[in-house]
Amino acid sequence: MRVWSRVSGLEPGGSEQVAGALAAEAVRAGHEVTLSLRPAAALDAWAAGMRAGGVGVERLAEAESKWDWGGMIRTRAAMAVCRPHLVHLHLVHPTADRYAPFLAPRAAAVIATEHVRHEVPERSQLWLKRAGARRLARVVAVSEAVRRSLVEHYGLAESRVTVIRNGVDLARFAPGGDRARARAALGLPALGFVVGSAGRLTRQKGFDLLLAACARMEGAFVLAVAGDGEDAAALRRLAGELGLAGRVRWLGRVERMEDFYAAIDVFALASRWEGLPITLLEALASGVPSVATAVDGTLEVLAAGGGSAVPPESAEALGAALDLWRHSDNLREQAAGDAARVGRLFDWRNTWAAYAALYEEVTAWKRTVSPRW
């Protein structure tokens, strides 16, 4: 099978991580895969790693809208080179009104994975996106919250929306890492309480709320932040204004995230919205108790245990929860086993098996109605 997969981010975030992992699995299964990425510098190292793993990578500018004729022509030409049996788009919201109806070849089955909940307020835009989404053979939602938004807001039939939850590599992320070595590798203090958080430094991830929450904490602690993004400079300024400059370690992009989780005592996620955050799954699988805002898929994960959920946009509630974890070693030890149990529920092997079955299902149907590209 030939697969053309498009992910439209400007840096390697959760959506890119899932798209890349699916592409790598498809290659290992014997399929021919082209992963289409924007020519953004922040994606260069990640793209090189994908190529080294045998995935075909093309760098292609985004078709910014259905009126971007140059972008539309370039994208259609790229698909023609691949001649795919399957087109896999990531994020329904930005792609439904151009990639699906106008660009995807008629001989290919087209599916899309929606990683976050989107709502379009303008009636005209909503109509266009609803019309475009009808071209999709199936839509995958990464959580029940995302599935509901696709059905209720976009008007997709429930039978066409499948929930396939994100997963985590349990061979890589597991309890029992060497804390002393991990902290030394990351430049963190050997002793003391360390709160960890990871993700793109953007408004969605709520790092401003996390900093405000940490400013409410008392006693000694360090906040370790893994990731980079457009708000990096503003967040560093905010940390200084809140008196946290000496307590925050800005680690940038961390290649060995298993070391990051081994180094921290509690994982914090202050997101304003989420689909199903991979960093939370990695932390839980690593046996790290977690506290996160009760939004979308995050709430679905923590409902199974492994940590606590707090109201969104509440630095006060988040700070109080972190203080509770800091002052109770016994509570953290008990929660560590529960966290690992919840993490094991999100085994990546199950995620890939579900996608592999979907790939076969939609392409088998397409071959019966359009056997040639």
Image (cartoon, grey):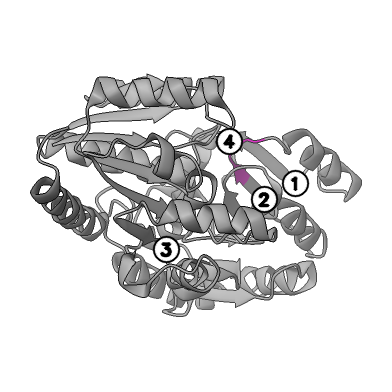
Kindly identify which residue carries mark 2. Answer: 223
Query: Dots 1 and 4: beta carbons under 8 Å?
Result: no
Kindly identify which residue carries mark 3. Answer: 284
Residue 65: assigned label: 4
Choose the circle earlier in sequence order: 2 or 1: 2
Choose the circle earlier in sequence order: 1 or 3: 1
Q: Nearest to the eye among marks 3 and 4: give it.
A: 4
Q: Residue at x 79, y 38 (%)?
A: 236
Instruction: Tell me how far mark 1 sits from mark 4, CA to CA.
Output: 43 Å
Q: Nearest to the eye among marks 2 and 3: give it.
A: 3
Please tell me how crowded label 2 is: few (under 14), some (14-19), or many (20+) other residues with Cα within 10 Å: many
Please tell me how crowded label 1 is: few (under 14), some (14-19), or many (20+) other residues with Cα within 10 Å: some
Q: Quadrant of residue 227?
A: top right
Magenta stretch encompasses residue 327: no
Q: In what element is the residue under mark 1?
A: loop
Kindly identify which residue carries mark 1. Answer: 247
